[in-house]
């Protein structure tokens, strides 16, 4: 009994180290290790007792420990991987806040300096954070946000191109059409014309 309990403890430590604390995530991972070790202990203990009591003594003790170890690891390796997502970094939080604020001020055409001031960082720091988290400049991301907002208005309303351009921060309809064509390889009017229509489709 004592030998098997020692083996059980060793299995817990070795398996926890071998599988890694992050494989299943915190308490859940440790609980699975304990349960698997208990199953192995319950299954192997009767056999180990008979062998240890017999003439093969020392050899049986080693076999007992090895058996618990192998069975436990086999059970654990079959468990699904459930890696926990990492929390957002400070840079990601700032970038997300910047994008959220920008989308609510599209018509005002805020500059990078305006956005940086709103999220309480310098313009150079904001640019660095965008490169670090999005691998693009703030201007590139903001341009995409304007375009996505314009596409949504084109799809969900009957607003004229001039009104869509103004609402999304473009200087004029021509500027909007140029930017749209550069990204989508077609004009806003053609893109809107080819949108799906029919039952269930609503354009306000």
Image: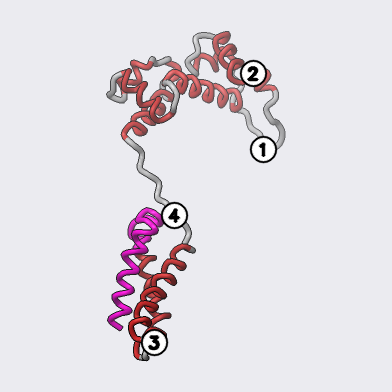
Residues at badges 4 and 2 in contact (C-beta under 8 Å)? no
Range drawn in magenta: 1-30
Q: Which residue in the protein does label 1 denote?
A: 200
Q: In this view, does 76 lie above or below 192?
A: below
Q: Which of marks 4 and 2 is in front?
A: 4
The disc placed on residue 82 is 4
Label 4 sits on a secondary structure element that is: loop
The numbered mark, 3 or 1, whose residue comes first in the sequence reads 3
Seen in the image, is 178 located left or right of residue 98? right
Given this view, does label 3 or label 1 mark the residue nearer the observer? Answer: 3
4 in the magenta segment: yes
Instruction: Identify which residue, 197 or 1, lies in the foreground.
Output: 1
Q: Tell me residue 159's x, y (percent).
A: 58, 19
Task: Answer with mark 3 or mark 4, whichever residue precedes in sequence.
Answer: 3
Q: Which of marks 4 and 1 is nearer the N terminus?
A: 4
Q: In this view, does 184 lie to the left or right of 3?
A: right
Q: Name the foreground residue: 9 vs 120.
A: 9
Q: Nearer the viewer, mark 3 or mark 2?
A: 3
Q: Point out the frontmost of discs 1 and 2.
A: 2
Residue at the spot of label 2: 185
Side of 116 where 138 appears, left or right: right
User: Dots 3 and 4: beta carbons under 8 Å?
Assistant: no
Q: Which badge, 3 or 2, is on the more N-terminal residue?
A: 3
């Amino acid at each position: 009994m004592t030998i098997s309990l020692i083996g059980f403890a060793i299995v817990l430590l070795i398996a926890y180290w071998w599988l890694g604390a992050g494989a299943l995530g915190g308490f859940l991972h440790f609980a699975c290790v304990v349960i698997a070790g208990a199953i192995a202990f319950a299954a192997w203990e009767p056999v180990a007792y008979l062998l240890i009591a017999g003439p093969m003594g020392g050899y049986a003790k080693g076999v007992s420990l090895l058996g618990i170890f192998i069975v436990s690891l086999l059970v654990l390796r079959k468990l699904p991987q459930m890696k926990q997502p990492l929390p957002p970094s400070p840079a990601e939080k700032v970038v997300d806040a910047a994008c959220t604020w920008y989308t609510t001020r599209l018509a005002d055409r805020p500059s990078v300096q305006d956005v940086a001031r709103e999220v309480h960082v310098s313009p150079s720091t904001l640019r660095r954070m965008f490169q670090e988290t999005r691998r693009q400049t703030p201007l590139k991301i903001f341009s995409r946000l304007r375009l996505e907002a314009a596409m949504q208005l084109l799809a969900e309303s009957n607003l004229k191109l001039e009104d869509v351009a103004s609402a999304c921060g473009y200087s004029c309809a021509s500027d909007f059409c140029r930017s749209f064509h550069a990204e989508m390889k077609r004009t806003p009017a053609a893109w809107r014309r080819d949108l799906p229509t029919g039952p269930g489709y609503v354009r306000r």
